[in-house]
Image (spheres, coloured by chain):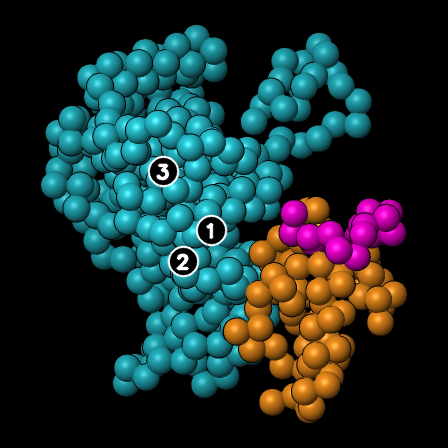
Chain colours: A orange, B cyan
Amino acid sequence: MEAELRSFLAENFLLGEELRTLPASASLIEAGIIDSTGVLELVGYLEEAHAIVITDAELVPENLDSIENILRFLETKRNSGPAA
Amino acid sequence: MTAVSGSAEPLTPAVLEIDCERVAADIVAALERIVTRELRRRGAVVGLSGGVDSSVSAALCVQAFGPSHTLALLMPETDSADETLRVSRVVADALGLDTVQHDITPILEAAGCYRERDAAVRELIPELTDAWRWKIALPSVLGTDSYRLFSLVAEAPDGKTVEVRLPAKNYLAIVAATNFKQRVRKMIEYYHADRLGYAVVGTPNRLEYDQGFFVKNGDGAADVKPLAHLYKTQVYRLAEHLGLPADVLEQEPTTDTYSLPQSQEEFYFSLPYDKLDICLYAYNRGLAPASVGPAVGLSEDDVARVFRDIEQKRRATRYLHLPAQLVEQIPEIPGSADPAADR
């Protein structure tokens, strides 16, 4: 799943080299990988690729600001049952 | 920049007080020098929006070049508020300026501005008709660390409102289409500048300039930007000093871009301008959030959120400030040897 996520980020934002060396714990915003529009795109991708609905309350850095946060969030969503 | 230190004295709004007479004189002298000597132009074109920034810019141009060498343009379109044109005329009359009015609606129609924009909106709200009014809105930055995602807020003729989160594709399509408005206006301004041998005056205040609240090659394009170093609060003080009509001083900053009234705060900025001015001033000086809170009525956490938002906007809009980048420097051409020099 991490490879898929890195692939989306690399292809969508044309940042192949930067993505390869980006630590999973790095802030995507502070690293300049995504901006506010990028967050919109990331949310859209996650909802579509993983058939989930991300609520407003879930739009927090703890869920979306790094690759490891996103993976943890997806795991939580998967364990919480089908999308609302 | 990072907020690193506390401040010995509590911050107050008084830090933004300026000597209006001196500031106005400095800008007038700079306009004369830049426009006539550096740019070799013989006057100024100013697009009036009915807001305080363009009104103050026009007033300073009148002082620098005289009313006969300052052209005021009025460029309404179908979504412009009625007040825009009325207040712009009041300002032009007060300054003794002749105006040229271009209704840019036909150009925008021909360019597909409304068609493309409305198609992106109707993908999300199929029942929306021309009788509906709508806007794009952002939630507040205060009280939460949540990401702020744009939503589309639409109001039916019966008053019913619909709010939906904007997918990236639709958001970008709407913004790209509406950016035609600022770019068409700039095209008109340069038409008159070319015709008259004038310079085009850009009217951003410091908040707008710093935070990238402009359209690249739209309202961001200009030959000179006389207010870009002044906080919005200071522009209001200048407006009073210059004796501009009360209609201008009472104007709330709006985008005047969408059919539902939209404040600049709900579309872009995180706070009302007077508070954001103080936060930006403090952030620029490395003051700690705790020392800023009392001056703006915010908690330390909220000031820290505003600081983060300021920095994030700087990062996100850096490219708007950059001129076209060259593969190799051309030292013979001023301004091109160091791309950063054009910012």
Report x, y in % for residue B91: 18, 37
Q: Are marks 1 and 2 in contact (CB under 8 Å)?
A: yes
Which amino acid is tagged 1?
A: Arg
Question: Taking A57 as reference, is A71 left or right?
Answer: right
Under circle 2, the secondary element is loop
Indicate the quadrant where residue A62 lies: bottom right
Q: Which of the two labelled residues, at mark 1 and mark 2, occupies the earlier sequence position? A: 2
Q: Which of the two labelled residues, at mark 3 and mark 2, occupies the earlier sequence position? A: 2
- Measured Cα–Cα span from mark 1 to mark 3: 14 Å
Which amino acid is tagged 2?
A: Leu
Question: Taking B80 as reference, is B322 left or right?
Answer: right
Question: Taking B206 as reference, is A51 left or right?
Answer: right
Q: Residue at x 33, y 66 (%)?
A: B260
Report x, y in % for residue B43: 35, 20
Question: Taking B26 as reference, is A79 left or right?
Answer: right
- Measured Cα–Cα span from mark 1 to mark 2: 7 Å
| Residue designated by label 3 | B291
| Residue designated by label 1 | B305
Indicate the quadrant where residue B318 lies: top right
Q: Which residue is drawn at 56% across and 27% down?
A: B343
Q: In the rendered view, would you say A81 is above or below B202?
A: below
The verdict on residue A14 being magenta is yes
| Residue designated by label 2 | B142
Q: Nearer the viewer's eye, disc 3 or disc 2?
A: 3
Q: In the rendered view, would you say B196 is above or below A48?
A: above
Indicate the quadrant where residue B64 lies: top left
Which amino acid is tagged 3?
A: Ser
Kindly identify which chain the residue marked by label 2 belongs to: B
Quarter of the image for the C terminus of chain A: give it. Answer: bottom right
Q: Of B231 and B189, which appears nearest the observer? A: B231
